Amino acid sequence: MQEELLLTPGPTPVARRTYQAMSQGIFGHRTSRFKEMSAGIQKKLQPLFGTDNPVAVLTSSGTSALESAMVNLVDDGDTVVLIVSGVFGGKFADIAGRYDLNVHVYAVTWGEAADPKSFGEYLNGLDNVTAVFTQACETSTSVLHPLSELADVVHNYNEETLFIVDAVSALGGADMNMTRDNIDCIVSGSQKALMLPPGLAFVAVNDRALNKVHSLGNRRYYLDLRMYFKSLEVDYTPQTPAVTLYQGLDDVLNMIHEETIEEVFARHKKMQNMLRRGIEALELELFVKEDAASPTVTAVTSTPEEIAHIKNTLEKDYHISVAGGQKDLAGKIIRIGHMGFMFPKDMLAILSALEDILSKLRNKNYYGKALTAAQESLYDKA
Ligand SMILES: Cc1ncc(COP(=O)(O)O)c(C=O)c1O
């Protein structure tokens, strides 16, 4: 019986120490013990987002954070722009469509990153845009958008226009910082680079966005960020939080700070490069060009027959889970997650399995090829 190697772009593996932290036993959330833990969590979360403001922690999945950004940062009748480059951009657009908003979609070819210059031209053709929404990493294609350049475009259009980023599959893996990159709001979730089970969502806002949160009326309840920020003044939550996940959150944030945020980003970058070099050595195609690729997930393409065979054989014979394509990309790509509690050795494990699968499938000798390329990248020997 082999343990499964979980290399999906979420959920991702959880460290044994985090499971242990989560099994300390439940305790009340209106206690000094909870307050102390919550205060510590805030101190450790804020540098990860790159903000000095409190970060709202919601007991719900990542989508709730997307919707929370929508209901707390734009008002009925507002004009918003959604950068849609895949399934999750589509989800943001779907959410926007449920509200009384004037919605514009800036469509980007799946597999490409938004080009700041073209996006600027598009944005400048619109009047009174109050907010622009994008993914950081579009998980369905494995693209990382150029956030700070897009933020510049948005704020050059209008200082007051908010730039809102869904970093569910990027925060804690890709180098981003709200203050440095001039991002007004970042939302994220627990089950990806943050190394936790699903169930927590995060919303961080800068002062400009916070003013907007306070300026809107009472048209939201569970997702009303005003309640979260008010409760955080005394290190509480407005509703019963997932205390167990908070215990885990405290632990993963300790892990991140023990490794240091910079080293965490560097490890993700290393895994990205190893995988990309290994995939090339296997004569598979990378779905995304080098300069648009995310350090948290990599999409690989080949014929539909090879894609199906690779995904099934990885799961059946090697106990390695990867994700397939979604919607238009179903059956056309496999997506290999490399975020959170994943390490270079995990990249070597999947590449060695791929060498075997492709050697047998194509009747060609790939043994050692991907591993050499990946290790040369890891040890800087290329
Ligand atoms: C970029 C992105 N946004 C939003 C979501 C939705 O998060 P959840 O499934 O936790 O609601 C995901 C989940 O995969 C995602 O990758």
Image: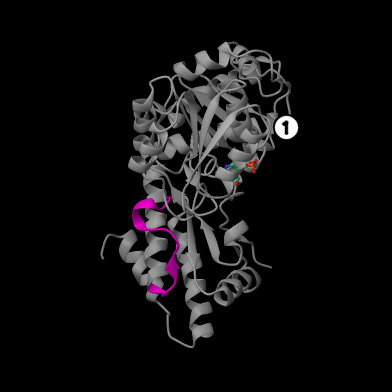
* Residue nearest the observer in this picture, 157 or 171: 157
Residue at 60%, 75% in the rendered image: 309
Say if 50 sits above or below 286 in the image: above
Residue at 34%, 27% in the rendered image: 156
Residue at 51%, 54% in the rendered image: 141
* Residue nearest the observer in this picture, 290 or 177: 290
Q: Quadrant of the C terminus?
A: bottom left
Figure disc tally: 1
Say if 125 sits above or below 320 in the image: above
Residue 258 in the image: state x and y as whole percent. 43, 37
Residue 205 in the image: state x and y as whole percent. 50, 23
Q: What is the span of residues highlighted in magenta in the rendered image?
A: 281-295
Which quadrant of the frame does ligand 1 lie within?
Answer: top right
Q: Which residue is mark 1?
A: 25
Quarter where residue 3 is shown: bottom right
Residue 114 lies left or right of residue 12; in this view the side is: left
Say if 104 sits above or below 330 in the image: above
Secondary structure beneath dot 1 equals loop
Residue at 52%, 19% in the rendered image: 54
Residue 225 in the image: state x and y as whole percent. 61, 19
